Image (spheres, rainbow, N blue to C red):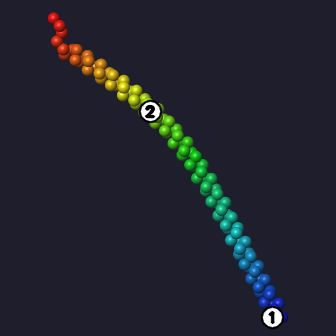
Amino acid sequence: MMGIAQGETTALQLKKRNKELEEELRKSKEREEHMRLQLRVALDRLRIAEDAEERLCSQLGDLEAEALLQARDYHARIVSLMDQLSQAHSPSPS
């Protein structure tokens, strides 16, 4: 009879352990799903950031090109004004 009681105790312990393992598995799956969701959100943010970076680089390139054109225009204007000033200060041939 002692063997039956001991077998029942072992069976109860195994059932209890099985329930504990099932609960741990459930929690693990919940954590995994939560991590997958966080990963999806992070990947979406990364994609958005990469798109924004591309747009900013493009805009920066456009601004650099515009700044270069303006600098060339200003330089040409300064050279022109310096020539005019030089001609105004030079003695006129009589």
| Residue 89 image-quadrant placement | top left
Secondary structure category for the residue under label 2: helix
**x, y percent for residue 36:** 64, 57
Q: Which circle marks residue 63 in the picture?
A: 2
Disc 2 residue type (three-letter) = Leu
Relative image position of residue 54 (x, y in whole percent)? 52, 40
Give the quadrant of residue 92.
top left
In the rendered image, residue 93, in percent from the top left (x then y), is placed at 17, 7
Residue appearing at x 54%, y 44% in the figure: 50
Q: Nearer the viewer, residue 47 or 19?
A: 47
Task: Say which label, 1 or 2, has the lower sequence index.
Answer: 1
Is 47 positioned to the left or the right of 17 in the image? Answer: left
Q: Are marks 1 and 2 in contact (CB under 8 Å)?
A: no
Determine which of the numbered discs, if any, sits on residue 2 in the image.
Answer: 1
Dot 2: within a 10 Å radius of its alpha carbon, few (fewer than 14), some, or many (20 or more) residues?
Answer: few
Q: Which x, y percent locates residue 17?
A: 72, 78
Q: Looking at the image, is 19 positioned above or below residue 28?
A: below
Quadrant placement of the N terminus? bottom right
Q: Quadrant of the C terminus?
A: top left
